[in-house]
Amino acid sequence: MEFITETNRIYAKNEEGAVIAEVTFPETQQGVCTINHTFVDDSLRGQGVAGKLVSAAVAHIEEQGKQVAATCSYAQKWLEKNR
């Protein structure tokens, strides 16, 4: 699965062009991006896709020299386990 990276969003589409996985992380304070939404289509659940999305978001945020925060419950748990 290929992820498409935008400024404050990483996502994947299926062959029909529908979004099947997504994480969003707007800059909520100067130098801080907050992961506020993680979505994975039911057909992909249990395959580690959400973890890959959050990991990619964290890497993208840190590459920009910004700090990571999270209000999304999945991202909060991921950060606790992986940071």
Image (cartoon, rainbow, N blue to C red):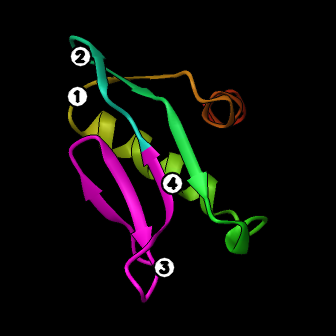
Look at label 2 and name its amino acid.
Gly
Residues at marks 4 and 3, CA–CA distance in whole angstroms: 11 Å
- Amino acid type of disc 4? Leu
Q: Secondary structure at mark 3?
A: loop
Instruction: Measure the alpha-carbon separation of dots 1 and 3.
Output: 27 Å
Residue pointed to by mark 1: 65
Question: Which badge, 4 or 3, comes first in the chain's sequence?
Answer: 3
Q: Position of residue 18 (x, y in %)?
A: 43, 73
Instruction: Give the vertical position of 13 relative to 55 (above or below).
Output: below
Q: Callout 1: few (<14), some (14-19), or many (20+) C-alpha neighbours within 10 Å?
A: few
Q: Provide residue 55's location: percent of width, then percent of height.
A: 51, 48
- Snapshot quadrant of residue 62: top left
Label of residue 31 in the image: 2
Give the labeled residue for mark 3: 1
- Look at the picture and state if 10 lies above or below 57: below
Q: Residue at x 27, y 24 (%)?
A: 66
N-terminal of the two: label 1 or label 3? Answer: 3
Comparing labels 1 and 3, the label whose residue is closer to the camera: 3
Task: From the viewer's perspective, tell me whether residue 59 is left or right of residue 7.
Answer: right
Which residue type does callout 1 highlight?
Gly
Q: Is residue 42 above or below residue 32?
A: below
Q: Secondary structure at mark 2?
A: loop
Which of the labelled discs sits on residue 23, or is there none? Answer: none
Q: Secondary structure at mark 1?
A: loop
Looking at the image, is mark 2 or mark 3 earlier in the sequence? 3
User: Would you name the residue on which mark 4 appears?
Assistant: 53
